[in-house]
Amino acid sequence: MSINEHRRQTHNDEIKQKTQFGKNSKKVQEFNLPNGLKILVKEDHRAAVVVSQIWYKVGGSYEALGITGISHALEHMMFRGTSCHPGAKFSQLIAAEGGRENAQTSQDYTFYYEELAASQLALAFELEADRMRYLQLKKVDFDKEKQIILEERRLRVDDDPFSLAYEKFAEKAFLNTYRNPVIGFAKDIYALNVSKLKKWYQTWYAPNNATLVVAGDINPTAVYQLAEKFFAGLSTSVIPATSSETFTTSPGQQEIIIKLPAKLPWVLLGFRVPSLVTATPKWHAYALEVTAAILSSGRSARLNKKLIREQQLAADAEASYDLYNRLDGSFLISAIPEKKITLNQLKTALLDQVKQLQNTEVSQEELIRIKNQVMARQIYKKDSMFGEARELGLLETIGLSWKLADQYVTNIQAVTAEQIQFVAKRYLQEEKLTVGILEPRNMHEIT
């Protein structure tokens, strides 16, 4: 056996061991309260700790122009207190027990989490149940928080050429509400007020729009009883119908040139593609997942090997695809050119890599190697209790089932070279392409 074959066999054995560990670990148990709260519990007794996450089906893609950023703003205000736990009491109580807590808002969800000693799970439930329906939204608090959010936007978007360029690109590339930034447009943030926040909070923050996920050194029945104690008495809300926009029409190939005071030029290609939620059949999405990895997973991936090391056209290049979107999304390929390489040259080189996927089947050796990398990356995420819980909550919140978590490896293993070529031909078409060009100001030699 050669050295490379030995390494490949060792890597495959590691994946099998990790997969087998998943099969032998405790199964997820699902409970439902009469008020609509779904509870998912995953036992994991490796350490006497617990992760508690509460997921709400609301985020940037639920927002209309004029109120962009409202989900993110409300996330900030969720740490401003209730009448029972005013001000920063929430965070102080968690910290006093040696725990940590935080939150995240995305296009498709907002979730909050606590990591604590398993014996302190009741504290996390008490605090989250309290602020699910009894948050105090005060003008004086929001006036302060709004300034923090605007500063966050300045640092993360307005003063970051790549982020600002992507925002302008997304406005053109997406045909659904993914065109709006999660943090919100500045003019919309300025226009937000407590009245709008209260309406948003009362609508979306309710047990029948939430999933509670718990992973750790716990007993599922005890978790359910504890959840019943704290959450069962919370009132429900009338949840508005949400958009299920898909790309039924295409405006054809588009290009946007963005001129900003940046140090480096950038090319961004975005192809309109389905997610696992919207794909029919579902294997299309898994094939797109593997396709992105063929281009961009590791040093041996095609963009790195061809464009960076061999042809020396790019200083950096990557591809990405988000399998877990609520709506149709984009297959993105981006690159920064090497000195003396024009943006048009780099764009042509990126499209050539797409054409190779369309015209020539991936070899079995390359496909096996890439699939092993994709599966390993997903399996290793489950090494942490947080990662286990996050996957369950994400799947449920975007409209899939947590049961798909155990099917990921099987579905990736099933992807064939023919399927890779099929999705490349079907979805990575130039009529479904938006090209974003970031041209640094005062760099006229770059075209």
Image: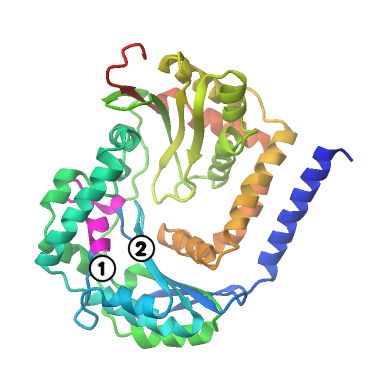
In the depicted structure, whether residue 360 falls above or below residue 137: above
Segment colored magenta: 60-76
**Given contact means CB atoms under 8 Å apart, are the residues at marks 2 and 1 in contact?**
yes
Task: Kindly identify which residue carries mark 2.
Answer: 103
User: In the rendered structure, does residue 355 fall within the stretch colored magenta?
Assistant: no
Q: From mark 2 to mark 1, how far is it between C-alphas?
A: 9 Å
Percent across and percent down for residue 304 are 58, 29
Q: Amino acid at mark 1?
A: Met
Identify the mark nearer the N-term, 2 or 1. Answer: 1
Up-down: is 159 above or below 202? above
- Which disc, if any, is residue 171? none
Q: Position of residue 295 (x, y in %)?
A: 57, 32
Q: Which residue is mark 1?
A: 78
Few, some or many C-alpha atoms within 10 Å of disc 2 (few <14, some 14-19, many ≥20)?
Answer: some
Front one among 109 and 135: 135
- Name the residue: 16% across, 54% down: 147
